[in-house]
């Protein structure tokens, strides 16, 4: 069960970030190239973290690595919705990618051990859990920009300014 919870965490958190991409682009007024560079940070994090994860799981075991990386990925996720500058979003994306990469390697090592000890083929079920949870995470996070938006404008509101409004015109056909 704990191995499935690791896959649950990875699936839901990755899927929760995906709907925030256009929100982050609009909120920070990013061009497509700027967004591309920021998304590269998401990929660099796991590239650097994944090789280290094997060493960590060998030294400390899977459980502490899964718990630490799972907790960290959940802690970093809200910053993806509220990072006030492109630089801070890049740092948050790097950390998010590194923690997801660490969690991914550690849960796969754990899953391989569980499968070996059980004598049954379980890996496809674990990865299926990741996919199902990815769908659940994407569906459950669709209102996230609305929930995160107050965090972005609470200071101007407190100072007496109005919260931002959506001034975009509906698409005319």
Image (tube, rainbow, N blue to C red):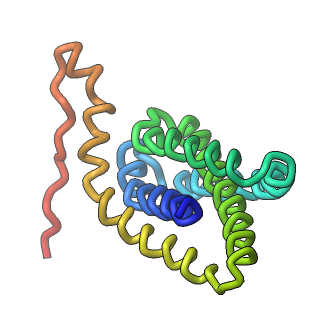
Q: Position of residue 146 (x, y in %)?
A: 24, 46
Residue, x 55% and y 51% (percent of image)? Answer: 34
Report the front residue among 172 and 47.
47
Which residue lies most toward the top here?
159
* Total number of numbered discs in the rendering: 0
Q: What x and y, as percent, mark residue 19? A: 37, 60
Work out whether 39 lies above or below 88: below
Measuring 85% from the left and 54% from the top, which residue is drawn there?
A: 58
Q: Residue furthest front?
A: 118
Looking at the image, which is closer to me, 166 or 105?
Answer: 105
| Quadrant of the rendered image containing residue 18 | bottom left
The answer to which quarter of the image holds residue 62 is bottom right
Q: Considering the image in quadrants, where does the C terminus appear?
A: bottom left
Of 150 and 141, nearer the camera is 141
- Rendered position, 58 above or below 15: above
Q: What residue is rendered at 36% in x and 51% in y?
A: 23
Q: Residue at x 20, y 21 (%)?
A: 157
Q: Please tell me whether residue 126 is drawn above or below residue 2 in the rendered image.
A: below
> Could you say where residue 55 lies in the image, as x and y percent from the top left?
86, 52
């Amino acid at each position: 069960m704990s191995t499935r919870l690791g896959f649950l965490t990875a699936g839901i958190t990755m899927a929760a970030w995906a709907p925030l991409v256009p929100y982050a682009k609009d909120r920070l007024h990013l061009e497509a190239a700027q967004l591309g560079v920021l998304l590269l940070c998401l990929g660099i994090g796991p590239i650097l973290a994944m090789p280290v994860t094997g060493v960590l799981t060998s030294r400390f075991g899977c459980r502490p690595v899964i718990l630490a990386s799972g907790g960290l990925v959940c802690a970093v996720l809200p910053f993806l919705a509220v990072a006030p500058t492109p630089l801070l979003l890049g740092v948050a994306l790097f950390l998010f990618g590194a923690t997801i990469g660490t969690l991914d390697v550690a849960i796969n090592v754990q899953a391989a051990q569980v499968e070996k000890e059980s004598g049954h083929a379980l890996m496809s079920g674990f990865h299926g859990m990741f996919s199902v949870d990815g769908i659940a995470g994407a569906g459950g996070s669709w209102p996230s920009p609305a929930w995160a938006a107050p965090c972005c404008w609470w200071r101007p509101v407190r100072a007496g300014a109005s919260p931002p409004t959506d001034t975009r015109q509906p698409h005319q056909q």
